[in-house]
Amino acid sequence: MIIFMNKKIKIILSILLIIAILAFIVFKVVEYKKEKEENLNFITIQDFIERKMDGKTILENQDIGLSFVLPQGWEFINTSWANVSMRTFDFEPFMGDVSRSPMADKGCWIDFNFSTNDTKGLDYETLNNVLILEGFLSVYNEEGNNAEIIDVNNVKAIKEFKTIGGVVDFMSVKIPFNKNRVYSFDTYLIGQDKEKCLEEFNSFLNSVSIK
């Protein structure tokens, strides 16, 4: 009887040990996935793969499912406020003051930001509600926003404007996607090339692919 009880206890302890090990493994996997997802908020242009096709420079990051074409005559630049910043070679900052970038006297600028779990002020739930809930866009605009729904390569997006004296000086296209992700593309329509910059921005959006 004692031997039988000892065997039973050993079996129970073995089962509990296996459960504890499995629980630890699951915890570590979940923790790793969460950490990896949060780290995506800090990607830079160095995290993109560059390839050439038909004379175009295509940038791709498979972890966030994004690819886009770098406009011809543009370059990448490191900034403290965006995951990826691009500007034309002829960019000149507003009033010649570098600290006023990305506002321009001449040339164009585009910023890209990526958010998971509503970081960087990019609220997935609010933006997604604008897209899927009837009447929410009107409510959103009544709160002081100036937005409309557009299509970016078969993905619904929200285009927002900011104006000075009735003239658009900033445009942002935000795409809520995959339950907690937001892709944001911004351009600054200030300076002598603002009409050209708007055309460049729209052309750039046509190259964006999210999956």
Image (spheres, grey):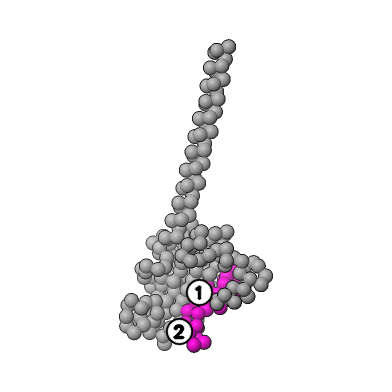
Residue situated furthest top in the rendering: 1
Tell me if residue 170 is in the magenta stretch. yes
Would you name the residue on which mark 2 appears? Answer: 194
Helix, strand or loop status at disc 2: helix
* Of pointers 2 and 1, the one earlier in the residue sequence: 1
Place of residue 102 in the rendered image (x, y in percent of width and height, measured from the top left):
39, 76
Q: How crowded is mark 2: few (under 14 residues within 10 Å), some or many (20 or more)?
A: many
Q: Residue placed at 57% from the left, 66% from the top?
A: 126
Magenta region, residue range: 146-173
What amino acid type is highlighted by mark number 2? Lys
Residue 147 position in % (x across, y down): 57, 76
Of 149 and 109, nearer the camera is: 149
Rendered residue at 40%/79% (across/down):
103
- Cα separation, mark 2 vs mark 1, equals 15 Å
- 19, 153: nearer the viewer: 19
The question of residue 127 being in magenta is answered with no
Name the image quarter holding the N terminus: top right
Q: Where is residue 116 in the image (x, y as percent from the top left)?
A: 50, 59
Q: Name the residue under label 1.
A: 172
Residue placed farthest to the right in the image? 134
Residue at image location 55% in from the left, 23% down from the top: 11
**Picture quadrant of residue 94:** bottom left
* Residue 39 % position (x, y): 43, 56
Q: Is residue 122 above or below residue 27?
A: below
